[in-house]
Image (tube, rainbow, N blue to C red):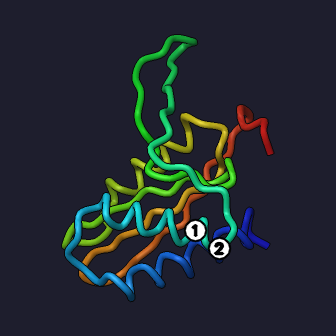
């Protein structure tokens, strides 16, 4: 069984539901808002644009905002470019997981064709599972 499989299955079904309704061509914010609505409608606790601090040797070296965090367990990164998902997007999500105590991330592309990637990053620093 995959880590947080039940939740990720709901997220992926919600992603396709939003994509099938809206199609391709909107800005990421439109998809983010629609997906947030759908996830909450499915009974999941979902928050958007959550600030996350990045530390190096105990010092804050930067911040980023997670598109959506689900149940305080899963990071969603949303893309809407016409070229779909590229390797750089996957590295971005892995870095977001590395910077947090989250171990599962989903990369969702609302491009010309819908795509998703599931990423897991674990290390000894992960303590909140």
Q: Which of 34 and 125 lies nearest the eye of the viewer?
A: 34
Q: Is residue 106 left or right of residue 92?
A: right
Determine whether the residue tagged by mark 2 lies in a helix, strand or loop: loop
Q: Is residue 106 left or right of residue 88?
A: right
Q: Where on the picture, by quarter, is residue 18? A: bottom left
Mark 2 closeness class: few <14, some 14–19, many ≥20 residues within 10 Å: few
Up the image or down, 29 lies above or below 80; here it is above
Residue under the image location 46 percent in, 68 percent down: 35
Quarter the N terminus occupies: bottom right
Give the numbered dot on residue 39: 1
Residue under the image location 55 percent in, 13 percent down: 57
Tag 1–tag 2 contact (CB < 8 Å)? yes
Q: Where on the picture, by quarter, is residue 65? A: top left
Q: Which of 65 and 121 lies nearest the eye of the viewer?
A: 65
Quarter the C terminus occupies: top right
How far across and down, in percent of the image, does residue 27 sit? 23, 63
How far across and down, in percent of the image, does residue 68 sit? 50, 53
Determine whether the residue tagged by mark 1 lies in a helix, strand or loop: helix
Give the numbered dot on residue 80: none
Up the image or down, 50 lies above or below 19; here it is above
Give the labeled residue for mark 2.
42
How far across and down, in percent of the image, does residue 13 sit? 56, 81
Q: CA distance from mark 1 to mark 2?
A: 5 Å
Residue under the image location 69 percent in, 40 percent down: 123
Mark 1 closeness class: few <14, some 14–19, many ≥20 residues within 10 Å: many
């Amino acid at each position: 069984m995959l880590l947080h499989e039940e939740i990720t299955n709901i997220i992926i079904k919600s992603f396709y539901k939003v994509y099938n309704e809206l199609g391709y061509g909107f800005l990421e914010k439109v998809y983010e808002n629609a997906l947030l609505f759908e996830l909450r409608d499915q009974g999941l606790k979902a928050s958007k644009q959550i600030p996350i601090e990045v530390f190096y040797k105990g010092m804050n070296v930067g911040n980023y905002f997670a598109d959506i965090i689900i149940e305080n367990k899963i990071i969603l990164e949303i893309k809407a470019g016409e070229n779909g998902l590229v390797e750089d997007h996957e590295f971005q999500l892995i870095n977001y997981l590395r910077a947090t105590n989250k171990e599962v991330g989903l990369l969702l592309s609302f491009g010309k064709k819908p795509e998703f990637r599931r990423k897991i990053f674990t290390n000894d620093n992960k303590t909140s599972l």
